């Protein structure tokens, strides 16, 4: 479990900020963060929620439902964060695109985490 948690942490702490940054560069009219702090704050919040949810929600609902729930949560967090940072411009469409892209990034990790959870369950 510790190895899975560390791998998941490294995966998310690397890919969330990178993916969000790339999305903001590819869709500047849709997703524009007020500052680097805004981008990093959103990434940190997604990291914390994702690490906890991967251990609990993934086991209860499975890979695909957990990924859809994650994408919806990511969409909401990115969209609502735009109201906290006044100089940012995040449209609802931009947040949906961000949620879908990050959901696909999460799908890869969910496959690994769920497989490891099942393996760990049968080893005990």
Image (cartoon, rainbow, N blue to C red):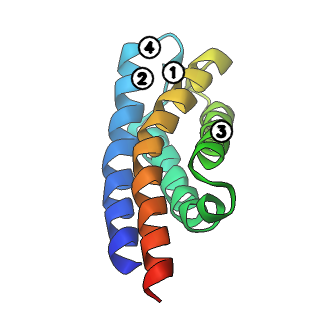
In the rendered image, which residue does mark 1 sit on?
Answer: 31
Rounded to the nearest angstrom, the CA distance separating label 3 from label 1 is 14 Å
The circle on residue 22 is: none
| Location of residue 8 in the rendering, given as x and y in whole percent from the top left corner | 38, 61
Quadrant (top left, top right, bottom left, bottom right) of the N terminus: bottom left
Whether residues under marks 2 and 4 lie with C-beta atoms below 8 angstroms apart, the answer is yes
Rounded to the nearest angstrom, the CA distance separating label 1 from label 4 is 5 Å
In the rendered image, which residue does mark 2 sit on?
Answer: 24
Whether residues under marks 1 and 4 lie with C-beta atoms below 8 angstroms apart, the answer is yes
Regarding residue 3, the answer to whether it shows in the image is yes
Q: Residues within 10 Å of mark 3 (few under 14, many from 20)?
A: few
Apparent side of residue 102 relative to residue 89 in the rendered image (left or right): left
Image quadrant of residue 99? top right
Q: Is residue 61 above or below residue 65?
A: below
Apparent side of residue 12 relative to residue 73 in the rendered image (left or right): left
Question: Residue furthest toward the bottom?
Answer: 124
Q: Earlier in the sequence, mark 3 or mark 1?
A: 1
Closer to us: 37 or 78:
78
Regarding residue 37, the answer to whether it shows in the image is no
In the rendered image, which residue does mark 4 sit on?
Answer: 28
Q: Looking at the image, which residue is at 67% across and 44% down?
A: 69
Question: Residue furthest toward the front?
Answer: 122
Determine the secondary structure under disc 4: loop
Rounded to the nearest angstrom, the CA distance separating label 3 from label 4 is 18 Å
| Location of residue 4 in the rendering, given as x and y in whole percent from the top left corner | 37, 70
Q: Looking at the image, which residue is at 49% across and 69% down?
A: 118
Q: Looking at the image, which residue is at 49% across and 60% down?
A: 114
Q: Is residue 92 above or below residue 56?
A: above
Whether residues under marks 1 and 2 lie with C-beta atoms below 8 angstroms apart, the answer is yes
Whether residues under marks 3 and 2 lie with C-beta atoms below 8 angstroms apart, the answer is no
Instruction: Select label 3 or label 1 by which is in front.
Output: 1
């Amino acid at each position: 479990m510790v190895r899975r948690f560390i791998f998941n942490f490294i995966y998310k702490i690397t890919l969330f900020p990178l993916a969000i940054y790339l999305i903001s560069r590819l869709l500047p009219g849709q997703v524009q963060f007020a500052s680097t702090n805004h981008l990093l704050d959103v990434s940190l919040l997604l990291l914390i929620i994702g690490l906890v949810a991967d251990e609990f929600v993934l086991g209860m609902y499975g890979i695909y439902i957990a990924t859809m729930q994650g994408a919806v949560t990511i969409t909401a967090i990115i969209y609502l964060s735009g109201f906290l940072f006044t100089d940012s411009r995040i449209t609802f469409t931009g947040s949906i695109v961000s949620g879908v892209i990050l959901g696909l990034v999460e799908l890869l990790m969910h496959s690994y985490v769920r497989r490891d959870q099942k393996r760990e369950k049968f080893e005990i």
